[in-house]
Each structure stands twice: as C-alpha cells, then as structure tokens.
Amino acid sequence: MELEGVEIEDTFAEAFPIKVARALITAVNERWAMEVAREATGFGTSVIGCPSEAGIDKLLTAEETPDGRPGVAIMICHFKKDGLKEQLIGRLGQCVFTAATTAIFNGLEAEEKLPVKLHFFGDGYEYEKAVGGRKVWAIPIMGGEFICEEEYGVKSGVAGGNFFIFAKEQMCALTAAENAVAAIQHVEGAITPFTAGVVSSGSKVGSKKYKFMHATTNERFCPTLRDKVEGSAIPEGVHAVYEVVIDGVSEEAVKKAMRAGIKAAVKVPGLVKISAGNFEGKLGKYQFRLKEVLGL
C-alpha cells in the first residue's frame, strides 16, 4: 500500500483503555493560557515513568470558553480513576490555581464526575456564583479572584494510538513528525503527550540484558543497529525513525488523529515508510489498522 508515494505497512497500532479528564484553562490572553497549560501538562509523556499522561488538546477562542476569555483545553489520562483524581488536584491546584489571571472549567461532558475541591483554600472567604451558566467558586487571592468549577467529567478513553515515520534523513523525519503533530492539533479530543508530540526513543517491554528494567530501547527500530540485530525493521536507506503517540477521548478521536497525522507526514519528501507499533495483539484492547484508518 502507498499514500503519496510512501509505503504504508500493512500493520496496526495497539492501544489501551485509559481514564480521561479534560479541563478548560482561561486567562487574560492566549500567551498566559498557553504558558499555564504547558506547565499543567508537564512530566506527562508516558505512564512508564510519569504519574499520568497529559497534553494540550486545542486552543480556545473567547467564544468557546465559559468566561469569554482566550483559553486552552488540556487532557489528563490515568489508568485508574483514583489516580486521575489525584492528578487533577495536583496539576490544576499547583499549576493553574497559582498562575496569574487564570480560571478553570470542566471540559468533558460525562455522566461520571470527579470532585476537585479547591475552594477550601479560600479559608471561608470563598463564595459560589455563576459564570457562563455554570456554578463556580470564587476564591479571593492576591491577584483578585480565582474562578473554578469543582466537578470534572471522566470517561474511558484510549491511550497509545501511534504511527512510525521512517525517513532517509533525520531532519526529513523530524519535519514530517512536526507536520503530523500540527495536523493532529486540529482534531478535538486527542493529544500527543510526548515533548512537542514526537517520540525519539521508542521502547519495548522489558529488557534482554537488564532484568530490573521495565522498558528498554526497541533495537529493531534503531537505524544504527540495522546490521547488528536479528529481525531489524529498518529498510535499507533509512537513517531516522520517529514515533507519534496519541491519546484520545474515544476510538474515533484517535483514529481521526492518526489519519490527519499520517496524511500530513507523507507530504514531506524523503519519507520511506509509515508503520505502527503493537504487541501482536496480546496486550491492548484496541487495534488501529493503518489501511482502515487511511481508507486504503
């Protein structure tokens, strides 16, 4: 199979169920909203070593937010509901509440909700009011008042949608990955949790040599090991591989994000192949076959 002259391997991305919450951060301007969103989603690349997976979903115009200010929607993901609640309290309480001019609102309609009770910080001076038709708390702070909702929708989402970009040169692969991430940013309900959305050091489960390691380099996808390991997945002429990992609020959101990302990536000259990572269907509940994602 080919798309724009680039080989699309007949394989699938294997993904997993995860609990997802979505918060809307608003501020006096887009710069402040984005700075706070980046802080609130930091150290959230992979649950292999981070307390949760987190990322920026989309920029919000003033018309899209409850208080009529610029904003950013973020997503926070955790395998357990209690763990997600803890992450919401920590990330929103320490990274958003403390930032100048910000407010927080629930960004996910769901039957199940998690309480994030920040109003106790007001020490009795806090009060309830309505903003944009929503019940919120107003908490007196040095900068004025902090406005927040205290119930956040939670639902079962999907973590680990992915695709691999094989290219002749490193900068070609990076440009394709950057274009893919930029396209995915237009898909609501999906995030690319790694730094700038790009994974440079894809891993495999466990280790062949170090038994204490839970994850180690995926040698089959390392170009410099092409002639040194059995079963290398690196085609001749490929000198760089990057991965884009996607978490979403639903299967459809992940599928749309994969499609948008791949279609943007293959337009870059020098790409050789698009593939995906899986565990032979043995671990993940979800399988996203590339040919079905792309309609090939």
Image (cartoon, helix red, strand yellow):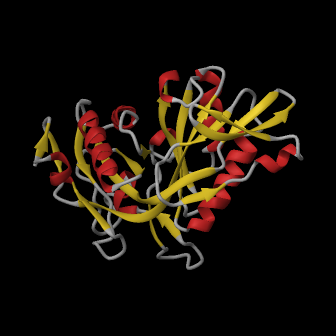
Query: Left or right: where does residue 284 sit relative to residue 55?
Result: left
Which of 83 and 125 lies nearest the eye of the viewer?
Answer: 125
**Residue 51 in view here:** no
Which of 155 and 290 lies nearest the eye of the viewer?
Answer: 155
User: Could you say where residue 190 lies in the image, as x and y percent from the top left?
Assistant: 41, 45
Extreme residue toward the top, this view: 29
| Figure quadrant of residue 143 | top right
**Residue 224 in view here:** yes
User: Could you say where residue 122 lies in the image, as x and y percent from the top left?
Assistant: 85, 43
User: Could you say where residue 256 lies in the image, as x and y percent from the top left?
Assistant: 28, 44
Which of 122 and 188 lies nearest the eye of the viewer?
Answer: 122
In this rendering, the answer to whether 13 lies above or below 269 is below
Query: Left or right: where does residue 211 sit relative to residue 97?
Result: left
Residue drawn at point x = 31 percent, y = 59 percent: 227
Number of numbered discs overlaid on the protein picture: 0
In this rendering, the answer to whether 71 lies above or below 229 is above
User: Could you say where residue 27 lies in the image, as x and y percent from the top left?
Assistant: 65, 26
Which of 259 and 5 lies nearest the eye of the viewer?
Answer: 259
Residue drawn at point x = 33 percent, y = 60 percent: 277
In this rendering, the answer to whether 59 lies above or below 43 is above
Residue drawn at point x = 50 percent, y = 66 percent: 216
Residue drawn at point x = 38 percent, y = 58 percent: 225
